[in-house]
């Protein structure tokens, strides 16, 4: 592979990372608004966000490790470095948190969520899972940008 191909793969990885944070932030914002405002006017918007955001998160969640590991292989960076292994473990934990968040959003979208007072608690836990996943993704971003020894 030439240097231009490597640069293009780096740009692609950066764009995918930006999109992941944008979609995750958008979903978190929708759940936060639904949690604070009841589900009055936000229910249709949250449902539309779920229909777009969940498949987008899935596609980005699969594509990012592939491009990241491809970049590591092309740069001949060993996979056994602490920051690589640490970010892989954090990515796994973030994926688990996002799966729990996504499941709760899909339950909410299907209309099987609890009503009235328990709904606020349901949305609060959903927001907690999403925020945990988002913070883990931020930690991965810091690890990969800092690249400690």
Image: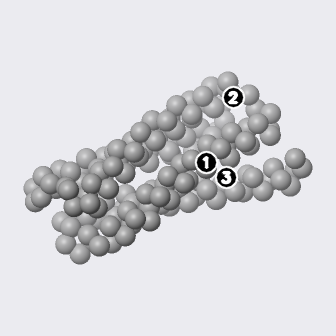
From the viewer's perspective, tell me whether residue 51 is left or right of residue 58.
left
Q: Are marks 2 and 3 in contact (CB under 8 Å)?
A: no
Residue 13 visible at all = yes
User: In the picture provided, is 118 more to the left or to the right than 142?
Assistant: left
| SS category of the residue bearing label 1 | helix
Q: Residue at x 81, y 50 (%)?
A: 6
Distance from disc 2 to disc 3, alpha carbons, whole Å, reads 18 Å
Q: Is residue 129 left or right of residue 74?
A: left
Q: Earlier in the sequence, mark 1 or mark 2?
A: 1
The secondary structure type at the circle numbered 2 is loop
The quadrant in which residue 148 appears is top right
> How far apart are the alpha carbons under marks 1 and 3?
7 Å
Ranked by sequence position, the earlier of labels 1 and 3 is: 3
Residue most extreme to the left: 117
Indicate the position of residue 137 as horizontal and vertical percent values: 50, 45
Is residue 21 something that shows in the picture?
Answer: no
Q: Which mark is residue 98?
A: none
Q: Residue at x 89, y 49 (%)?
A: 2
Image location of residue 111, percent across then percent down = 22, 61
Image vertical order of residue 56 relative to residue 146, above or below? below
Please report contact status of discs 1 and 3: CB closer than 8 Å, yes or no: yes
The quarter in which the C terminus is drawn is top right
Badge 3 element: helix
Disc assigned to residue 13: 3
Give the residue at mark 1. 64
Q: Residues within 10 Å of mark 1 (few under 14, many from 20)?
A: some
- Which residue occupies 28% across, 61% down? 109
Q: How many labels were placed on the picture? A: 3
- What residue is shown with label 2? 79
Residue 107 image position (x, y, % from top left):
27, 54
């Amino acid at each position: 592979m030439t240097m231009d191909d490597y640069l293009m793969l780096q740009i692609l990885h950066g764009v995918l990372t930006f999109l992941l944070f944008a979609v995750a932030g958008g979903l978190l914002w929708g759940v936060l608004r639904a949690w604070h405002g009841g589900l009055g006017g936000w229910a249709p918007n949250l449902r539309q966000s779920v229909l777009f955001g969940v498949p987008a998160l899935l596609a980005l969640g699969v594509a990012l490790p592939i491009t990241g590991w491809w970049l590591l292989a092309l740069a001949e960076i060993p996979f056994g470095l602490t920051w690589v292994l640490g970010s892989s473990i954090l990515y796994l934990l973030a994926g688990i948190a996002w799966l729990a968040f996504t499941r709760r959003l899909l339950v909410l979208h299907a209309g099987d969520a609890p009503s009235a007072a328990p709904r606020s608690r349901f949305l609060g836990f959903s927001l907690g899972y999403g925020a945990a996943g988002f913070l883990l993704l931020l930690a991965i971003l810091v690890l990969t940008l800092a690249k400690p020894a």
